[in-house]
Image (spheres, coloured by chain):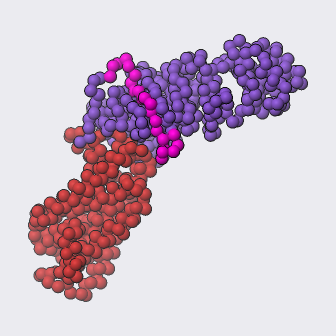
Amino acid sequence: MASTSAPSSTPTASGPVAAVRSLRKSYQGKRVALDGIDLDVERAAITALTGPNGSGKTTLLRILAGRLAPDSGTVSVLGVDPGVDSPWLRSRLGFVSQDIALDPEMTGAQLMRLFAVLYGVPRRQLGPRIERLAQSLELASHLDMRVSAYSGGLRRRLHLALGLLHEPQVLLLDEPTAGLDPAGRAFLWSLLKVLAEGSASVVVITHDLGEVERHCQRVAVLGEGRLLAHGSPVELVRAHARRTVKVTLAAAVPPPSDPLFAGLGALPGVKAVHRRESELSIDVAEEHPAKERILALLSERGLDVRGFQVEPPDLASAYFQLTGVAVEQHERPARLPRAGGRRSKNREAAS
Amino acid sequence: MTRALRIISSIGRRTLMKSLRRPVVLSFSLVQPMIWMLFFGFLFQRYRIERLGGDIRYLDFLLPGICAMTVLFGASQSGIEMIRDMQTHFLGRLLNTPADRRLILIGKLGADVSRLLAQATVVFLLGLALGAKISPSLPGVLVSLIALGLFGFAFASLSCTIALLTRAPESMAVFVHVVNMPLLFTSTAFVPSRQMPAFLASASELNPLTLAVGALRGALLFGETPSIARSVLPLALLALILFAIAAGAQRRAARD
């Protein structure tokens, strides 16, 4: 009989719902995925896990889900080590992987009924629960179709529905919005909000920083297997984000050797200047230098300005400052410089 | 229905539904024993099978062997569905529910065994249509079906273990050559042990297929009730051991 390990004492209702300490994991003893992570997951809240590709987010989530064993460190979810085979924990944990795990030969209804039985959903609740979930995920009219006939978005929603069927206390989601249209994404976030309000604790891997700012109470930023920052989105913005002045020129921005950059760098409050094609991004302190002084420098160099706007500090900026990777560069391989300022390869900086 | 039975029957229903949706595979699994029965049956009909007793001809003798062979070949492919489930990540999902993983495996193997016994029954009826003569006893047939079911359960477990360890569909083809063929030709499925060379005859006595075939042959041809101690118990023990190994492999497959 598999052990039915349950926590010896009920974890306090106010403490973290999950915690990891000094967590390390490498693959084949070579590629380091997690390099000493300490993290508390808040109860009844949505925690976003974000960071560039290869930063260790999925590894961390799979360890929390008990799918992967760490090399060292401790993990606790609802007071139980997920590495110990615990049906007690499995019945309270929902894990929705990035890879869609469905049987294409079965219908949506067959899959829902099968998993309801495996999760031990009481028979009387089974029908209403499937119906409610199918309604809310807009699957109801497709339940009698085989999964092989489902569209990508439908599969994603059914994949999610199977993870929610047993009303887990802790829900771990790996990029659940991938492949969903904007309406599907909006719906998913509102669903997660409802679940968290209903006292579920949600950890979600996402690159959608705008949504994180709107919907998540906590956000943890990972980079190269380390926890770079953890806090509320407001705290992260306050601590790490910069106000950015975006200038669009009529022609390409001159090379970093151009005196323009020395001039901009000398302006009070300028932290960094990034150039890309015809766009200049100037990271500035809260009290940024007068628009006129920047414009004057540009006109001295004979550069024709087409656009000029001041962007307020946001999570995307905090993310960039922390990881060195711009949000729009997610899909490219990212390398993080350890010291000497955080800059991505694709943006030359001259400050 | 208790929770355990609900789990077994839900998984069993899924397994059966998926096999029934593969009519080509199902019908091929009947064609193969038919070909063997026709070739061997009519090829060796000319030769004398000594001292079989009564007026038993080679086709009569062969039929129980072919029925057991149908179960063996079917059981050896039991793991293929598991490999498909691993490829779609579905197995990991099944195994990470709170349901006892051994019940999930029992549901799958139980469904496979009932399908195999049904296939063996069809092969048996086809054999009768070809002219095989039998004089069965009902209790004997029931006991030998249990023996045959345990035999199928054991080898389906072995197939699942190989599938879980290799995760490669090719391993199922290798299974046929490495396990099925040696097992078949060192058993009494086609030849009575007294017509085998001495070393082969003693090997055949240890062969689980011989136990299953012997029980079925005794019940169908001679109306005997097989000995529980000599046929059912050893096969039950083998099934238990191979099931435990498969359950261990499955537990490891629940993790990445």
- Magenta stretch: give its range: A11-32
A19 part of magenta stretch: yes
Q: Look at 41% across and 25% down and name the residue there.
A: A201
Decide: is B61 above or below A26.
Answer: below
Give percent across and percent down for residue B43. Answer: 29, 84
Give percent across and percent down for residue B254. Answer: 37, 44
Q: Nearer the viewer, residue B17 or B185?
A: B185
Give percent across and percent down for residue B202. Answer: 19, 75
Question: In the image, is B239 to the left or to the right of B79?
Answer: left
Among the chains pictured, the one given purple colouring is A
Q: Nearer the viewer, residue B81 or A86?
A: A86
Quadrant in the rendering for residue A348: top right
Q: Quadrant of the C terminus of chain B?
A: top left
Decide: is B38 above or below B116.
Answer: below
A151 part of magenta stretch: no
Question: In the image, is A54 to the left or to the right of A60?
Answer: right
Q: Quadrant of the N terminus of chain B?
A: top left
Q: Look at 56% across and 17% down and name the residue there.
A: A234
Among the chains pictured, the one given red colouring is B
Q: Nearer the viewer, residue A227 or B102?
A: A227
Give percent across and percent down for residue A321. Answer: 63, 25
